Amino acid sequence: MSFALGLTGSIGMGKSTTTQMFADEGCALWDADAAVHRLYSEGGAAVKPMGAAFPSAIVGGAVSRDALKQIISNDPAVLRTIESIVHPLVATDRSRFRENATADILVFDIPLLFETGGDMVMDAVVCVSASAEEQKRRVMERGTMSEAQFDQIRAKQMPNDEKCARSDFVIVTDTLDHARAQVQDVVRQIRAGMADA
Ligand SMILES: CC(C)(COP(=O)(O)OP(=O)(O)OC[C@H]1O[C@@H](n2cnc3c(N)ncnc32)[C@H](O)[C@@H]1O)[C@@H](O)C(=O)NCCC(=O)NCCS
Ligand SMILES: Nc1ncnc2c1ncn2[C@@H]1O[C@H](COP(=O)(O)OP(=O)(O)OP(=O)(O)O)[C@@H](O)[C@H]1O
């Protein structure tokens, strides 16, 4: 039986980078944002229901993120409707991965892990964390969101301190080397626990 490790953290805190480090240690990865990308792409399971709710969001047979961001900035309340369509489809994708994966540790990169109650079905949770200033700097540097869009997304997320307090492990993503050392330590602890069990 594999060990299910949920990995979460607020926007721009270093989830993708840190999850990749878990892969380097031999863990199998599942990424909620990547699942959403698959669901939104042409032929993806979200295209039909999203098109029914937001016809202007469908461009070239796929859900357009730019169109969605425009729709959300006109009316922030629609994010709820989007979530009610997308989250059940994401949950199905995650269950399918879990049933088929064979690695000893499965890492689930889920931005909204606590917000959606996903922590309940994990064996442990790790939160990635950096300072609020660093977080904003990173997201702005990426250039894919306006400051208003960033503030809106961040306001919807559970505060960083609360996420860290509820997690079994916290990984500080101040430098790559420091984060990698912490990842290796977490993997060591989990494997030691599995060997004892
Ligand atoms: C709002 C959208 C269009 C922005 O797309 P874009 O490509 O610019 O950003 P991306 O998807 O990479 O998201 C960036 C980060 O925003 C945060 N975020 C995304 N959606 C949400 C949400 N509904 N609530 C809180 N935070 C969110 C996550 O930390 C994510 O890592 C897109 O994120 C979306 O369709 N979200 C709804 C689906 C969802 O809830 N996804 C979250 C993972 S299940
Ligand atoms: N340990 C680290 N040390 C230094 N920089 C880091 C570290 N981890 C991540 N970063 C940098 O921070 C930025 C955001 O990282 P990443 O994309 O992994 O975050 P994320 O939490 O997955 O973001 P999002 O929630 O927006 O999907 C990237 O530019 C990345 O290079």
Image (spheres, rainbow, N blue to C red):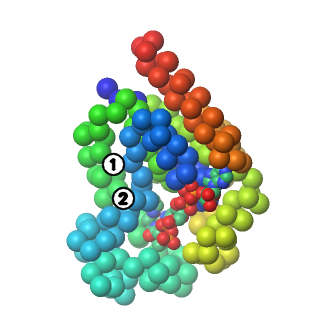
> Mark 1 = which residue?
94
Asked if one can make out residue 168 in the rendered structure from this viewpoint, the answer is no
Type of amino acid at the residue the image marks with label 1 = Arg
Residues 184 and 80: in front is 184
As drawn, which residue projects farthest toward the top?
Answer: 196
* The image quarter in which residue 59 lies: bottom left
Q: Residues within 10 Å of mark 1 (few under 14, many from 20)?
A: some
Mark 1 to mark 2 CA distance (whole Å): 8 Å
Mark sitting on residue 21:
none
Residues 109 and 82: in front is 109
Asked if one can make out residue 187 in the rendered structure from this viewpoint, the answer is yes
Q: Residues within 10 Å of mark 2 (few under 14, many from 20)?
A: some
Residue appearing at x 49%, y 18% in the figure = 192
Residue 185, given in percent of the width and then of the height, sits at 59, 29
Element at badge 1?
helix
Residue 46 versus residue 159 in the image, above or below: below
Residue 106 versus residue 53 in the image, above or below: above
Q: How many numbered badges does the structure rendering display? A: 2
Residue 118 versus residue 185 in the image, above or below: below
Type of amino acid at the residue the image marks with label 2 = Ala
- The disc, 1 or 2, on the residue closer to the chain's N-terminal end is 2
Position of the C terminus, as image quadrant, is top left
Q: Is residue 44 left or right of residue 154?
A: left
Residue appearing at x 50%, y 84% in the figure = 70
> Mark 2 = which residue?
35
The answer to whether the residues at label 1 and label 2 have Cβ atoms under 8 Å apart is yes
Residue 131, given in percent of the width and then of the height, sits at 74, 53
Residue appearing at x 71%, y 48% in the figure = 174
Residue appearing at x 26%, y 74% in the figure = 42
Residue 82, given in percent of the width and then of the height, sits at 41, 70
